[in-house]
Image (cartoon, rainbow, N blue to C red):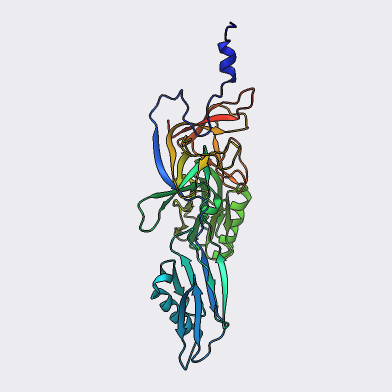
């Protein structure tokens, strides 16, 4: 009987599975369960009243349910919109799907109450125009070893929702800085990338003409320093400087310093117009990595692509060490970047790009490379472990 070469066996054995906990990790592990709501989009429809006709019955059907409003002898578009919105709300099988709001001018907007649960509108009155502003989208599957973000809680439900981290799920963060003009005084704005903790731009301008010139000069100076795919500054309003994240999901901050060179010290206001919040920041929404599960089957026959199905609970590792797919050469303690674009969404990298954002070392770092000669394409990420 031939003896077994244990070293050979060890070298051929896969070091781990995508999404599985690293066996050599001896620290405490934290996991949470989120309902897979990845890819869900709330449907939005607009119905515009094109013509106001006296004594006309305005109607449409939503999933076959009639919504109608009888115009009076002095019909206006605003009155018809208000009437249709009120009729929608009092129609049980209509209001169960969506909210309906009149703009008080010539349009009603119908918005899904539950993202992913849509409807069909038919038989729209000939004096109106229907526009599907946002198409309904149901949830999609989520593979193992991917970046997961929390979507919070659905109205009236107890389950916390989760999805693959993607820019499409974020609204870009916006900050608005409004300085006052004091001749000869200096105003400086500094912008910080919260993912790295580094200053990415700092520019000072002298108030030498008027407020519009000061805002334009500050914005132009900042834009010469701000890296690509970070933040863009805009001073075109003439009264303020607006800072906007170029990659949805990027969190940043800014502060202002003013000088006393003028007759008085300039005042200023800083407004967080949008965010920072889980809806604008990957740092605030990041929940962890989708965990390997032996209970979830392959999505397609004769393949190796197990995943969490749509609308089912999925385990997410919040703290610990997890195997993920990686075709890069990983070095210990390298920065972790999350892909937020439409290709390879939620996958992890050690290099930056126009669609990736980094996680601070306090949240995640690459622990070790797991690639073997037989092409395992694995690596370990260490989550929330100092």
Q: Residue drawn 53% across and 57% down?
A: 137
Looking at the image, can residue 108 be seen?
no
Identify the residue at image location x=64%, y=24%.
374
Most foreground residue, 225 or 60: 60
Image height of 349 relative to 101, above or below: above
* Residue 205 lies in quadrant: bottom right
The residue at the point 41 percent across, 24 percent down is 26
Tell me where residue 241 appears, x and y as whole percent. Answer: 54, 59
Relative to residue 8, is residue 23 drawn left or right?
left
Report the residue at 52% width, 80% height from top: 106
Position of residue 362 relative to residue 341, above or below, is above
Q: Nearer the viewer, residue 202 or 24?
A: 24
Q: Quadrant of residue 129?
A: bottom right
Residue 283 % position (x, y): 47, 45
Check the image and name the residue furthest to the bottom.
73
Which residue occupies the foreground of this view, 255 or 293? Answer: 293
Q: Is residue 2 visible?
A: yes
| 103, above or below 249, in the image | below
**Residue 99: percent from left, percent from top:** 43, 69
């Amino acid at each position: 009987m031939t003896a077994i070469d244990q070293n050979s066996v060890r070298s051929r054995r896969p070091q781990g599975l995508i999404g599985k906990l690293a066996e050599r990790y001896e620290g405490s592990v934290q996991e949470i369960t989120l309902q897979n709501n990845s890819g869900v989009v709330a449907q939005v429809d607009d119905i515009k009243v094109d013509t106001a006709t006296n004594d006309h019955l305005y109607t449409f059907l939503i999933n076959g349910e009639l919504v109608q409003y009888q115009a009076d002898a002095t019909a206006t578009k605003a009155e018809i919109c208000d009437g249709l919105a009120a009729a929608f709300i009092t129609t049980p099988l209509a209001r169960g799907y969506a909210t309906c709001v009149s703009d008080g001018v010539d349009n009603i907007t119908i918005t899904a109450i539950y993202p992913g649960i849509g409807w069909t509108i038919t038989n729209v009155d000939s004096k109106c125009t229907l526009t599907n502003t946002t198409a309904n989208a149901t949830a999609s599957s989520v593979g193992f070893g991917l970046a997961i973000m929390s979507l919070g809680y659905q109205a009236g439900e107890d389950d916390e929702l989760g999805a693959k981290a993607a820019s499409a799920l974020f609204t870009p963060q916006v900050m608005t800085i409004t300085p006052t003009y004091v001749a000869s005084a200096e105003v400086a704005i500094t912008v910080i990338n919260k993912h790295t903790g580094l200053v990415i731009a700092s520019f000072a301008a002298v108030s030498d003409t008027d407020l519009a010139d000061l805002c334009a000069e500050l914005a132009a100076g900042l834009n010469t320093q701000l890296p690509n795919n970070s933040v863009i500054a805009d001073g075109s309003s003439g009264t303020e400087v607006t800072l906007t994240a170029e990659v949805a999901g990027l969190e940043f901050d800014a502060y202002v310093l003013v000088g006393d060179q003028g007759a008085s010290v300039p005042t200023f206001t800083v407004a967080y117009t949008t965010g920072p919040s889980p809806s604008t920041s990957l740092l605030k929404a990041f929940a962890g990595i989708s965990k390997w599960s032996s209970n979830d089957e392959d999505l397609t026959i004769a393949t190796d692509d197990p995943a969490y199905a749509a609308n089912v609970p999925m385990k997410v590792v919040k703290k610990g060490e997890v195997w993920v797919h990686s075709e890069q050469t990983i070095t210990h303690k390298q920065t972790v970047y999350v892909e937020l674009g439409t290709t390879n969404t939620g996958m992890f990298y050690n290099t930056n790009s126009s669609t990736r954002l980094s996680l601070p070392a306090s949240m995640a770092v690459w622990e070790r490379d797991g690639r073997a000669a037989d092409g395992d394409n694995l690596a370990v990420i260490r989550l929330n472990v100092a």
